[in-house]
Image (spheres, grey):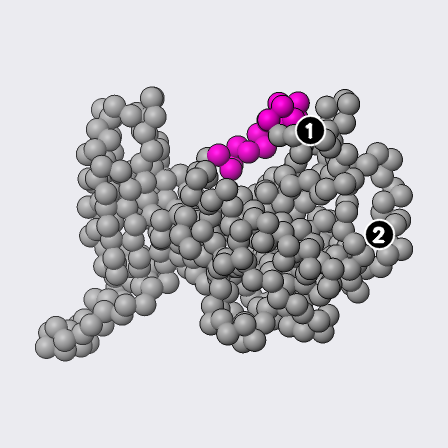
Amino acid sequence: MSSTSRGDFYFRNLYAKEPDFRQLARQDADFRAILKPNDQLDFTDPAAVPNRHNYILWLKQLLDSSSYNEPGGKLSGLDIGTGASCIYPLLGCAQRPWSFIATDIDADNLKHAIKNVALNSFEDRIRIVSRKPEDLLIPLEELNLSHIDFVMTNPPFYQSEAEMLKSAAKKSRPPHSACTGAPVEMVCDGGEVAFVSRILEESLVLKDRVQWYTSMFGMVSSLEVMVEKVRERGINNYAVMEFLQGNKTRRWALAWSFGPMRPCQKAGRGLKATPWRRILPAIVDAEISRFPSGDGVGAKGDALSTLVGGLDLISWQWDREMLRGVGRARENVWSRAWRRKRKREEAEAGPSVKSKEEPSETWIFGFSVSITVNMSEAILECRWREGHDESIFTSFCGFLKTRLQAQVPKKT
């Protein structure tokens, strides 16, 4: 199946309903041969796909929302410890025109991964690479790569085989998708925290040569530890997510980036706020105002465009039909402090010098504003797109709320 033959909507809803195995058996003789008399499958045989699929769906959302490019472009990723199935690269290539480097340290895994890639005709987009346990996990230099878009991994959960067996013994009922990983895939010294910590340390050297470093976790306690480690190293652009398939299997994920592009709120803050508030990243969406949908939406959009366009921004584009604008600012140019500073600099420089000055083309803040119209009301929202300083976003939202509120006629 090609990545262009099915759209994102199809893949988002692929497991929205339980699959009808009986219907599939009518359509496929090979599938009919492994279907049990009770119309179910033995999931201790092949590993089930849904939670792997959820990881890919999240990656798509993460990458799409942290770029100004149209979704669906050609991106490159590294899957660390791809396993015998090579499932993540296969799913990624089936859904998008992506390419992958897939690494593993186990000879049997590598052999089967190569076979699975060939069976799916993705040899030109998935490259299988053998590694040793002591090798770098993200070997961009060895692979002659200057940059990749993302790193992903489903790391070994357990610190020892004894811990793995103890965990399995605690489960009174097996999950729908039984763990089929070999010890080399499930166990490493220090468990998943130690493994992902290696990726974190390598990322401190590579920095923005990778846009997003990501990992899945089998234990939420590991996610908590790694969020703290990421924060301790001064990384403030990160995302967290929980994957839940049915009512059995939960997994968690973390992503971090050294770049300024912020993912959308849904991709970045994918945990329930109440129990996990302390590990959530910064909010990137803010509601500015609401007003009746029949109350001159177009005029309010024009007023918003004029207000923001009047600022000393690096760029500002307003789409009147879509009621959406995108801009970038070199500083918090809407603040009184900035205006006072600007007047002082202009007065000190004099008119002849001022006319020759070129404004800085570097920016610290990127944003979008939009008006969404429904049956009864319209909602004006601001989205933080770029930057590392949350206070700039908060300040800009405050400016919009204050100035737009001031434009509302007072009732008499």
| 152, 303: nearer the viewer | 152
Where does the magenta region start and end? Answer: 10-27
What residue is rendered at 28% in x and 46% in y? 325
The kind of residue tagged 1 is: Arg
Pointer 2: residues within 10 angstroms few (<14), some, or many (20+)?
some
What residue is rendered at 73% in x and 64% in y? 107
Tell me, for residue 308, which label it has, or none.
Answer: none
Tell me, for residue 32, which label it has, or none.
Answer: 1
Location of residue 243 by image quarter: top right
The kind of residue tagged 2 is: Met
Which mark is in front, 1 or 2? Answer: 1
| 286, 87: nearer the viewer | 87
Location of residue 362 by image quarter: bottom left
Could you tell me residue 112's position as x and y percent?
68, 55
What residue is rendered at 79% in x and 65% in y? 189
What residue is rendered at 50% in x and 74% in y? 144
Tell me: 161 left or right of 8.
right
Tell me, for residue 164, which label it has, or none.
Answer: 2
Q: CA distance from mark 1 to mark 2?
A: 34 Å
What kind of element bears circle 2? helix
Could you tell me residue 326's position as x and y percent?
30, 50
| 357, 81: nearer the viewer | 81
